[in-house]
Image (cartoon, helix red, strand yellow):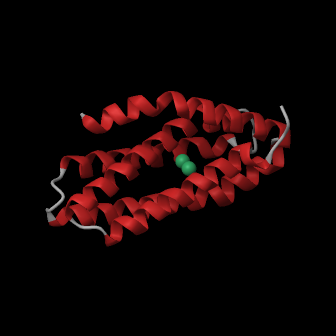
Amino acid sequence: MAKTKATDILSLIEAEHRQVENLFAEAEKAKGANLVEQFNKIYIELILHARTEELVFYPALQEYKETEQYVEEAEEEHEEISVILEEIKALKHNKPEFKEKMSELKETLEHHVKEEESEIFNAVRKCMSDQELTELGQEFQETKAKLVSNVEAALAM
Ligand SMILES: [Fe+2]
Ligand SMILES: [Fe+2]
């Protein structure tokens, strides 16, 4: 298959980070049912993104001495993000804690995204070839597609 920039795993991850940031910007303006709807989108996108990274990107990081050191902390941050997502899901949207928890989620996420896009991506570029990054991009998209229905079901639980 022809190599395209679009299927490079780093570009895909970056694009998803920007997409979630846009959803947060929308959520900040939203109230009532719209806020819940906006949270639901964030929940689905974030869990899909994190699970796919854990299944495709982080195992690839484990393969190289330049990148393996980053996996443990990144997984812990995913865990932290998942906990906050479940806490928000359990809250009623009209409670004052809802917006507070959304801010906490946003901050935790900002820290994690910054780390991925700076330190981790820099280290990845030093050890993985363009071809490997493209193959991982393909795998990332395929794995994510398979997870969609499970994550949507988790939101409904
Ligand atoms: Fe991540
Ligand atoms: Fe990420």
Q: Please state the horizontal and vertical placement of residue 147, each as a whole percent of the image.
A: 48, 30
The N terminus - image quarter: top right
Query: Toward the viewer: 64 or 58?
Result: 58
Q: Which residue lies at the image location 84% right of the left edge and 40% below the top edge?
A: 3
Can you say whether 10 is above or below 136 in the image?
A: below
136 relative position to 151: left or right:
right
Is 104 positioned to the left or the right of 7 in the image? Answer: left
The foreground one among 144 and 98 is 144
120 relative to 68, above or below? below
**Residue most toward the bottom?**
29
Residue 17 in the image: x percent, y percent? 55, 56
Residue 139 sits in which quadrant? top right
Quarter holding residue 58: top right
Left or right, 144 with reference to 42: right
Q: Is residue 20 above or below residue 43?
A: below
Give the residue displayed 69% in from the left and 51% down from the top: 11
Is any part of residue 23 visible from this angle? Answer: yes
